[in-house]
């Protein structure tokens, strides 16, 4: 797994964990009202989900081989 994939995955998991906490009434962002916490969490979750969805993530062995093949053809950056 490359560095960019790891970062995107971690951001997505953090956003999902934050969303889970807000759903159960635990405000994970200190100093904000409940409504602002939910709005901020929704924005973070939507952004991380969109980022992870639209970006190619080569997390499986097959995906790693695909990435190497695309790089060999000069179709993606190394």
Image: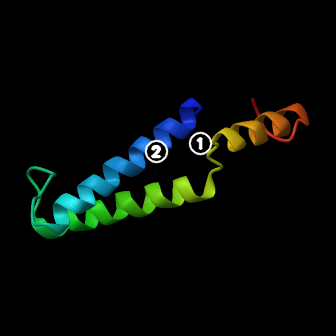
Dot 1 corresponds to which residue? 59
Earlier in the chain: of badge 1 and badge 2, it is: 2
Between residue 54 and residue 57, name the one nearer to us.
57
For numbered disc 1, what is the local secondary structure?
loop
Q: Residues within 10 Å of mark 1 (few under 14, many from 20)?
A: few
The residue depicted at 33 percent of the width and 53 percent of the height is 15
Q: Are the residues flagged by discs 1 and 2 in contact, CB closer than 8 Å?
A: yes
**Circle 2 — which element?**
helix
Task: Answer with left or right where residue 27 lies relative to residue 56.
Answer: left
Residue 63, position in %: x, y? 69, 43
Indicate left or right for 67 with 1 as reference.
right
Q: Nearer the viewer, residue 11 or 60?
A: 60
Q: Position of residue 44 (x, y in %)?
A: 36, 57
Residue 9 has which mark?
2
Q: Is residue 29 above or below residue 34?
A: above
Residue 45: % across, % down = 37, 60
Above/below status of 52 relative to 7: below
- Tell me which colouring the rendered structure shows: rainbow
């Amino acid at each position: 797994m490359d560095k960019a994939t790891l970062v995107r995955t971690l951001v997505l998991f953090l956003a999902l964990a934050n969303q889970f906490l807000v759903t159960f009434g635990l405000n994970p962002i200190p100093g904000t009202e409940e409504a602002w916490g939910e709005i901020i969490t929704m924005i973070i979750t939507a952004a991380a989900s969109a980022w992870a969805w639209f970006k190619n993530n080569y997390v499986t062995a097959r995906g790693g081989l695909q990435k190497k093949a695309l790089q060999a053809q000069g179709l993606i950056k190394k």
